[in-house]
Amino acid sequence: MTLQTFLLVVIAAGLHATWNLISKRAASAGTSFVFSYRLLSVVVYAPWVVYILWNDGMAWSWPVVLFISLSSALHLGYSICLMRGYKLADLSVVYPIARGTGPLLASAGAFLWLAEAPSTLGVLGICSVVAGILLIATQGNWRQFAHPQAWVGVRWGLLIGLFIAAYSLTDAYSVKVLLVAPVMLDWLSALGGTLLLAPSTWMRRTHMVQQMRGKWGLALAVGVLSPLAYILVLYALQNGANVSVVAPLREMSMMMATFAGFFILKEKVSPVRWLGCFVIIAGVILLSGH
């Protein structure tokens, strides 16, 4: 992996951590917030899309249409399942399972479908990052998984992780093989998701306006930062980076969020979470040399 590609993923991870911290402040708005920030992202990034179409154009084919449509459905399914999982199960169970299994499944899929060659250092790096994620998110409290209710969260976490892996592989194929411009892919995917949500949002538009009161500034921030974070990841993939490397590296956002909580929000961080950060750093070092 080149230094430029590595820096793209690092910046993307920082943006990912930032927009997730912002979106947590609007969690009560649920699907209304998802629709709002997706709609705003479509509007904000439209000039960039027009510029690309005007200068470079776009080669349309049935595989391109299929994979863009699939991307829209998978990203929307991820968002809906994430909110549903958080509603039915504990965040402390759903989140670590989802963020841990996502890169693991994506890497396995890349080895099988995209013919990426696994290396010993790469596999060790992937496992190290996943272990660090679980340490940060659970703080070493494994006993919570002994309760029957926790397994509801495990099932939702696995489903969400499957969506993460699926859209990671689908989008990687789009930019690496079908040569779709990353900005075009993300924008068309967001447009598709917005259109899919539009009918239900219109039916409950009064409730949606109430839920979004005072949250439009947050939606705009997420609508700008969330696509940008993912576009940088797509550019890294298009520049030749492997999914099995990029998918785990994206999870540096959890480590960054922990550091931000400690240095900016003055939160107390347990020794187990610090250990998780150092385990992720070790995984990043292994992956960066892969």
Image (cartoon, rainbow, N blue to C red):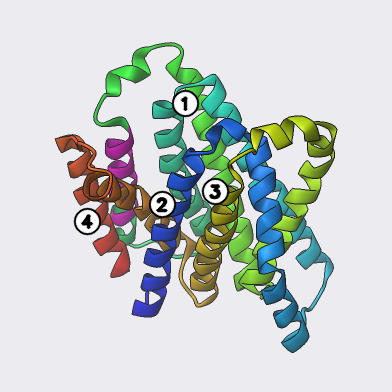
At label 3, counting other C-alpha atoms closer than 10 Å, the crowd grade (few under 14, some 14-19, many 20 or more) is some
Which residue does the image show at 37% across and 52% down from the upper left?
253
- Quarter of the image with the N terminus is bottom left
Which residue type does callout 1 highlight?
Val
Between marks 3 and 4 in the image, the one whose residue lies nearer the viewer? 3
Magenta span contains residue 129: yes
Q: On screen, 11 above or below 170?
A: below
Which residue does the image show at 43% across and 18% down from the upper left?
150
At label 2, counting other C-alpha atoms closer than 10 Å, the crowd grade (few under 14, some 14-19, many 20 or more) is many
At label 4, counting other C-alpha atoms closer than 10 Å, the crowd grade (few under 14, some 14-19, many 20 or more) is some
At label 1, counting other C-alpha atoms closer than 10 Å, the crowd grade (few under 14, some 14-19, many 20 or more) is many
Magenta span contains residue 89: no
Mark 2 to mark 1 CA distance (whole Å): 23 Å
Which residue does the image show at 26% across and 62% down from the upper left?
286
Residue underneath mark 1 = 154
| 67 sits left or right of 265 in the view | right
Q: Secondary structure at mark 3?
A: helix
Which residue type does callout 4 highlight?
Ala
Which residue does the image show at 65% across and 38% down from the upper left?
212
Q: Secondary structure at mark 4?
A: helix
Residue underneath mark 4 = 282
Magenta highlight range: 125-137
Between marks 2 and 4 in the image, the one whose residue lies nearer the viewer? 2
Q: Earlier in the sequence, mark 3 or mark 4?
A: 3
